[in-house]
Image: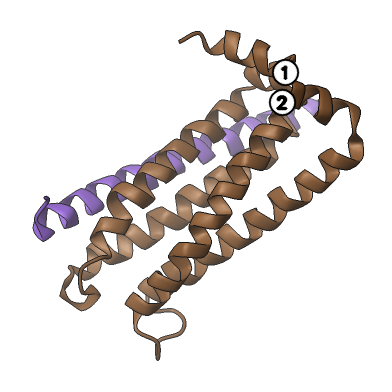
Amino acid sequence: MDVLAFFQWLDTSTLADISKAYGGVFAVVQMFHLLAMALLGGMVILGDLRMLGVLMKDVPSEVVIDNTRKWFNAALVVLIASGIFMSSAVALKLYYNEMFWAKMASLAIGVVFVYGIRGPLLKSDHRSLNPWAVRLTAIASMTIWFTVAASGRWIGFS
Amino acid sequence: MMSRAMKQKLAIGASVGIIAAAIWFWTLQIGSVIETLRLASG
């Protein structure tokens, strides 16, 4: 698939017409993007710090992970949808931006890690798991989502 | 269906890889900022 062709199409799509012409719409979508980022970050920090035994020690970690998972999923859907809309306004600029690709790569790794590794691992009884597997998973999870958010912010400076 | 032992090995391997890649990535980024600041200050 020609990636540049996709970004050229996105740059001239109806979505791009709306995001470029209506600053108010863009600002509202951006607000939802930031709210979803706060929600996703909050769920990641809550779940991972519980796995590390830093907070909410009186609540079983299985309960914390179960409760944060659905909000994480919702936040990720809002982030991706609002992100596509926002990127349509500057699609070609983003295509040539290295940090944008660093963000997309870390986002892809984060999604695979959460749904392919962290999720299946934490379906087991947490006390039966190797403590180092749990700790390393929590640290890697916070690291990858920090990288997604920080490299996204860095796009504006590069 | 993966066994629990396999899931744990995979989690440890992937986590170490992610942490190492993030350290490498951010070291490069911070290094590039320091270099830019050094050049800017003459």
| A5 or A49: nearer the viewer | A5
Q: How far apart are marks 2 and 1 (CA)?
A: 8 Å
Q: What element carries label 2?
A: helix
Q: In which quarter of the image is residue A85?
A: top right
Residue A45: x, y in percent? 51, 66
Relative placement, left or right, of A127 versus A151 is left
Q: Is residue B8 visible?
A: yes
Residue at 75% x, 34% y: name it: A156
Q: Which amino acid does label 1 sit on?
A: Ser
Q: Which residue is drawn at 20% across and 68% down?
A: A124
Q: How crowded is mark 1: few (under 14 residues within 10 Å), some or many (20 or more)?
A: some
Q: Residue at x 28, y 51 (%)?
A: A117
Q: Can residue B34 be seen in this view?
A: no
Residue nearest the viewer, comparing A70 with A155: A70
Which residue type carries mark 2? Ser
Using residue A108 as the reference point, say whether residue A117 is left or right of it: left
Secondary structure category for the residue under label 1: loop
| Outermost bottom residue | A58
**Marking on residue A88:** 2
Q: Chain A is drawn in which colour?
A: brown
Nearest the camera: A85 or A37?
A: A85
Of the two numbered discs 2 and 1 in the rendering, the one whose residue sits closer to the viewer: 1
Measured from the top left, where is residue A27 in percent x and y?
Answer: 84, 44
Place of residue A152 in the rendered image (x, y in percent of width and height, measured from the top left): 64, 39
The color chain B is rendered in: purple
Residue labelled with disc 1: A13
